[in-house]
Amino acid sequence: MVFCTCANHDEASKLAHAIVSEGAAPCVNIVPAIESVYRWEGKIETSQEVLLLIKTTRARFPALRELIVKLHSYNTPEVMALPVTDGLAKYLAWLGATIAT
């Protein structure tokens, strides 16, 4: 599971479509209207962003990360991968089969 925030819905949609089209992940959820509070260049910032929840495999993560860095508008985009330790076997099988094609 990879998290990536985007500046707006248009960017999130374009990035999600590119990720799936390029085979870096078979599924991306777009979560609209999140508020991010973070430290940037010594100041506390608050931004309205859109969150991508990207389902991929460990093997495809390097290609996914490279694609996000290439296409993202941020100089330092959030690309955070968390391991999936369990899930519905049928869904995990679909994920593995889909990413392999």
Image (cartoon, rainbow, N blue to C red):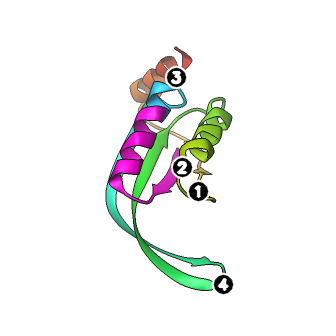
Asked if the residue under mark 3 is in contact with the one under mark 1, i.e. CB atoms within 8 Å, the reply is no
Residue 84: % across, % down: 55, 42
Queried whether the magenta region covers residue 7, the answer comes back as yes
First along the sequence among labels 1 and 2: 2
Element class at badge 3: helix
Residue depicted at 63% across the width and 42% down the height: 65
* 101 relative position to 47: left or right: right
**Residue 93's x, y, as percent?**
47, 22
Q: Quadrant of residue 41?
A: bottom right
Residue 99, label in figure: 3
Name the residue tied to disc 1.
77
Say above or below: 96 vs 7: above
The label shown at residue 72 is 2
51 vs 17, nearest the viewer: 17
Name the amino acid type tagged 1: Pro
Q: How far is the residue under mark 1 from the one under mark 2? A: 7 Å
| Distance from Cα at disc 3 to Cα at disc 4 | 40 Å
- Binning the other alpha carbons within 10 Å of mark 1 as few (below 14), some (14 to 19) or many (20 upward) gives some
